[in-house]
Amino acid sequence: MSNFISDKTIAAISTAQGEGGIGVIRISGEQAVAIGDKVFCGVNGKKLSSMKGYTAAFGKIVNQDNKEVDEAVALVFKAPHSYTGEDVVELSCHGGVFITQQVLRAVFEAGAVPAQAGEFTKRAFLNGKIDLTEAEAVIDIISAKSRIAARAALFVKDGVVRRKIDEIKESLLSLTAHLSAWADYPEEDIAEVSDDMILDVCNNAQNQLQKLLDTYDSGQAVKQGIDTVIAGRPNVGKSTLMNLLAGCDKSIVTDIPGTTRDVVEDTVLVGDVILKLSDTAGLHDTNDMVEKIGVDRARKRLEQCRLLLAVFDNSSELDDEDLNLLNLASDIPTIAIINKSDLPQKLDVELIKSKVNKVIFTSAANGEGKDEITSAVAEIAGTSNLNPSDGILSNERQRIAVSNALKSVDEAKSAVKCGLTYDAITVSLEDAISELLELTGEKTSDEVIDRVFHNFCVGK
């Protein structure tokens, strides 16, 4: 890894752009305190350079013409005990686009340079304050859209995934070191390596890696959401269900079949799972050209979705469109929703149950059934048993690294069972270790690092 830390002192606005109570300008680098002293005048006349770390002072911000810009509180953090591992000064001024920009301009005039996207966190990584999984968790905390997503990201930021990876990595390193020593120094008094010992270590690593890998899909459900389609024939209550889940009148609801002529979309939180909902036109044949476009779009969405909420009318018998929807449901994770459960039943529910595992009775118009839908969604998404404190893989980069490490461990086990030499086994184990080192960022390319931090906002 050849990424190096620039000797330039960087600065950026670390709070959201807009009106607010305060705006924070962060300065990090060797000259952070000296630059802070050029723009900040404490009311007590005390210089920031004379302050201890983790202390604050109240004063005024002045520009290079010595004109007052704003009042501010200056916080001083001394290396290495700061977010970035460098000297850091944070200036908290009044919030607002104009004022924060003026304070930032004064900081630039005093010698700082603009921070790049994610550069503060990147410096924290390069200074050994956090590993790459913990750095990626920072952006997950910022972008979290649910309680469980925020908690999961916080646990990863606190190092839960890194500790699991370190444990697996150390066991594989110890094994490869033992294999190498036993092969290279046969005359030394080194404990003989047995196939059973190798398989025990590999089995343990395999189990732990698989557990981590199993968290990916459920983690994505709480973090990114699931593309979900509400489908059914006209007038079964799709739009009413959409409004029930969205908590507002997103779709037009009438007793007239074919009211929904296009795909209506919304992102809703159902329990701890984000659903990217699409309320589609009723699936049926029609001569209305506009309605036909909506039906065609509905069928296309069905082919692409990852979860289907198939809605049926409890008060009506199954028709051809219902049966076609049931056939589609066999290829997609599906929750069958029997709507209008408050009306006399004419629907062949047993046939639906024979096709779909999850069947729920609702009366969307009366607001009934949402809790049952929430539980079913959690079970299908895998979040019902998701424990954020166990740590989850949060992105495709991490998933690929764990998957590749698992594959290499499997290859090592196969090599043992096939009676291959310990040199061949060691090669597979070293490949697994290399993948884990790349996961944590201990051994990775500049390109990977730059790609990770490119997704960050400026100021973090």
Image: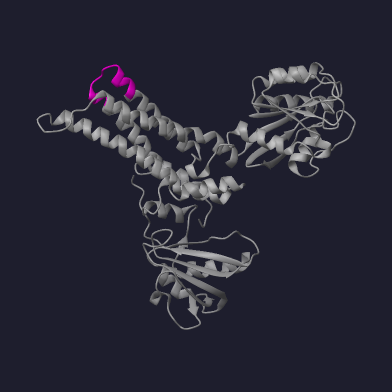
In the rendered image, the residue lying farthest to the left is 187
Q: How is the image coloured?
A: one colour
Q: Which residues are magenta?
A: 413-425
Q: Residue at x 63, y 29 (%)?
A: 306
* Residue farthest toward the bottom in the current orientation of the protein: 44
Q: Quadrant of the N terminus?
A: top left
Is residue 323 in the magenta section?
A: no
| Residue 277 seen from this side | no
Percent coordinates x, y for residue 422 in the rendering: 23, 24
**Which residue corresponds to the image point at 76% horizontal and 24% vertical from the top-left?**
296
> Image check: 84 left or right of 233?
left
Residue 200 image position (x, y, % from top left): 32, 28
Is 414 covered by the magenta stretch?
yes
Front-most of residues 341 and 159: 341
User: Which of these two is toward me, 452 or 214?
Assistant: 214
Seen as rendered, the residue at the extreme right is: 256
Q: Main secondary structure of the magenta part?
A: helix
Q: Residue at x 54, y 52 (%)?
A: 457
Quarter of image, res 442:
top left
Q: Is residue 408 left or right of residue 39?
A: left
- For the question of whether residue 141 can be seen, the reply is yes
In this view, 106 is above or below 399: below
Rendered location of residue 262, percent (x, y)? 79, 32
Q: Is residue 278 left or right of residue 261?
A: left
Horizontal and vertical percent for residue 168? Answer: 35, 37
Number of callouts in the render? 0
Depth check: give the residue in front, 228 or 410: 410
Taking 79 as reference, is 100 left or right? right
